[in-house]
Image: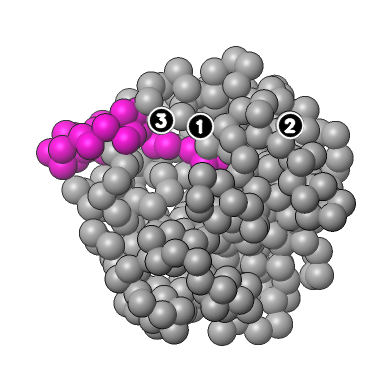
Amino acid sequence: MPVQRRLVTFSIGTAVLGLLVGGVLVADRDATDSAAGKGAGAGRPPAVEGTTAIGAYLDYGPQGVRRMADLSRWLGGTKLRAGHSYLPGDVWENIEGRPGFLGSWAAWRKASQERMFVLNTPMLERNEEHVPDEEVRSLLRRGAAGEFDGHFRTLAERLVLLGVPDTVLVLGWEMNGTTYTHRCGPDPAAWKAYWRRIVTAMRSVPGQEFRFDFAPSRGRDAVPWTECYPGDEVVDIIGMDSYDQPPARTFDEQVNEPYGLRKQVDFAAEHGKPVSYPEWGLFRNGDNPEYMRRMLEWM
């Protein structure tokens, strides 16, 4: 298990539709700015040893912001310093962060310099429509050729204009699985090239301070997530979505399974990156206090 780490929690311990969805960002104690996030700027919430930024995903839009106050009260007045939302992956207009969609989150983030905004960002439209592998392969290659760059420049421009240039973007999450159109398996080489195009396009926008989180699902899934890693120069954080679900039956199996929690931590250390858990919680195995305790200890 990782020891002597800095811990920055960006969403933890909130029940949403029966799931416990949360995450943490964990950086090496002695991590430099360049190791903990490329291009760290003065406007970014500091990742300081002992600092925690507690929050949760509560809803995509304004309702999620309003529910932050309820969560704070439920936690006994705990200050919530992190907000977590997802861009809809149905059409490009929404992936671009259509006008009005992110305004409430931007206002919440700007109300305090201590706050952090985390935004899961799809890489392709029709992201949950079970698009067949052959079409996914074609779309990834089109993206790698630059066809979709403009959509991500638009998103970057809108985030900068809204005053949240330090957003953490969980780009193409769970790419090693089969759920999303932005999955890696049909063509890992094209997927990696496409990720690099997106990051390059978004970093080309003046004023940006984005951090990009590479967050596979725990385990091998459809393809080893290491085969999808696009390179240190375009990744700031090594994430992992890790729910209490099969094939791992125990927490020790979640740690030690191929491409599990231990592999994530070791891989991040090898590449000089902090680690995160954008999504974690109870799922499919029912109530499991041991999982909750062990996951918190692991963090």
What residue is at 61 percent from the left and 44 percent from the top?
A: 57
What residue is at 69 percent from the left and 60 percent from the top?
A: 9
Inspect the magenta stretch and tell me whether residue 259 lies in it.
no
Inspect the magenta stretch and tell me whether residue 129 lies in it.
yes
Q: Quadrant of residue 141?
A: top left
Residue 254 percent coordinates (x, y): 41, 76
Give amino acid for label 3.
Answer: Gly
Quickly name the residue at label 3. Answer: 89
Quickly name the residue at label 2. Answer: 66
Quickly name the residue at label 1. Answer: 87
| Viewer-nearest residue: 186 or 189 | 186
Residue 59 percent coordinates (x, y): 59, 35
Vertical comparison of 56 with 26: above or below = above
Q: CB atoms at circles 1 and 3 under 8 Å apart?
A: yes
For mark 1, does the 10 Å Cα neighbourhood hold few (<14), some (14 to 19), or many (20 or more) residues?
Answer: some
What residue is at 69 percent from the left and 42 percent from the top?
A: 83
What span is colored magenta in the figure?
Answer: 118-142
Give amino acid for label 1.
Answer: Leu
Residue 15 percent coordinates (x, y): 59, 51
Vertical comparison of 227 with 291: above or below = above
Q: In the drawing, what numbered circle is on residue 12?
A: none
Q: Say which quadrant the C terminus sits in.
A: bottom right
